[in-house]
Amino acid sequence: MAESLSEATPSKAVLPIVYRDEDLVAVNKPAGMLVHRSPLAHGETRFVVQTLRDQLGQRVYPVHRLDRPTSGLLLFALSPQIAARLSEAFCEHRVEKRYLAVVRGLGPERDRLDYALREEDGSRPKAEMPAMAAVTEIRRLDSVELPVQVDRYPQARYSLMEARPLTGRRHQIRRHLSRRGYPIIGDAKHGKGNHNRFFRERLDCPRLLLAAVGLSFHHPVKRARLHLSATLDGDMSKLFERFGWAGHVPSAAIRWEDDEVACART
C-alpha cells in the first residue's frame, strides 16, 4: 500500500485523504459533518467514521475529535492496537495541532491563553462541572478593515489567527478566543450574531471559520515524526482571497522528521 495520497482523491471518494499507510489514515473533514453517530444527531445520515469505513472497505478507529462545524485534519487508526497508541499520544499532549481562525477585531500579535474551562458535555449543570486547565497559544497572521458598519463602529476589523492548543478541552479554541474578546466568525454559541449574520448574508460564508490545518506526531510504528498539513475548503479559501490573505492558505503536505532531529528540536 502506498504511504501517502494527495487530497485529489478519485471521484467516487467522499472524504479527501491527506495521508494513508497500513497503520493509520488522515482525512480533511468537511465543515458540518459529524465524526460519528450520536444520540443528539437526529436526522443525520452522513458521518465521518461510517463514510471512511465504506470508502476504505475496512474498519477505522477515531483517536480524537473535531467539532461538527470545524473542518480539517482528522486522524484514524486502522487497528485497535494503533488506536490505543495514538489515543495515548493525544491524551498526553504529544500531538501538535495547528488551527486557522477568522475572528472579530484586531487580534493580538501573540498571546498565551490559559483560562481554565469547565466541561460542556450536557450531562450536568456547568456549575457542577470542575474547571480544567486549558492553554492555547495564538498569533495574528493578518488582518483586514472593511468600510462597513456591522456594530457600533463605522468600520469592521477582522483578523486571521493561528491557534495551537496545548490541551484538549471541548470547544477550547472557540471559548478561549471569545473570552479574550476575539470570537470566531460563525460561532453560534460563543460568537457575535451580527458579525455572523454579516458573513453569512454579505460574504456568502455561513460556516464556522475554524479549520484544523496541521498535525504533528510520532508515528506509532515508524521511527520518525510525521507532519501533516491540509488545505482549506472552498468557502474559507474564497474568503482568504477576498481579504488578501491568499498567501496564508496552507497546502496539503506530508513531511517526515527523523527521530534524532525531532528530539533535538524539542
Image: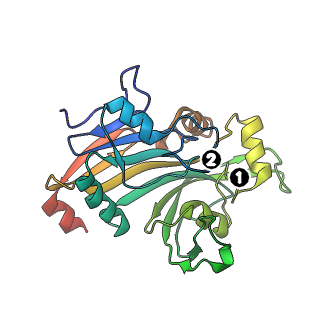
Task: Evaluate if marks 1 and 2 touch, with contact meaning CB atoms under 8 Å apart.
Answer: yes
* Residue beneath the point at 44% across and 28% down: 14
Residue 184, image x, y percentages = 64, 55
Q: Residues within 10 Å of mark 2 (few under 14, many from 20)?
A: many
Q: Quadrant of the N terminus?
A: top left
Q: Nearer the viewer, residue 220 or 54?
A: 54
* Residue beneath the point at 20% across and 53% down: 257
Q: Residues within 10 Å of mark 1 (few under 14, many from 20)?
A: few
216 vs 203, left or right, is: left
Residue 183, image x, y percentages = 67, 59
Q: Is residue 181 above or below residue 233?
A: below
Q: Quadrant of the C terminus?
A: bottom left
Element class at badge 2: loop
Residue 108, image x, y percentages = 59, 65
| Spatial separation of the CA atoms under disc 1 and disc 2 | 8 Å
Residue 252, image x, y percentages = 37, 38
Name the residue type under label 2.
Leu
The residue at the far front in this view is 39
- The image's colouring method is rainbow
Q: Which residue matches tag 2?
A: 208
Q: How many marks?
A: 2
116 vs 152, left or right, is: left
Element class at badge 1: loop
| Pointer 1 or 2: first along the chain | 1
Q: Is residue 41 above or below residue 110?
A: above
Instruction: Kindly indicate the quadrant of the structure image that contains residue 11.
Output: top left
Q: Nearer the viewer, residue 56 or 114?
A: 56
* Residue beneath the point at 31% across and 65% down: 88
Q: Which mark is residue 118?
A: none
Q: Which residue matches tag 1?
A: 188
Name the residue type under label 1.
Ala
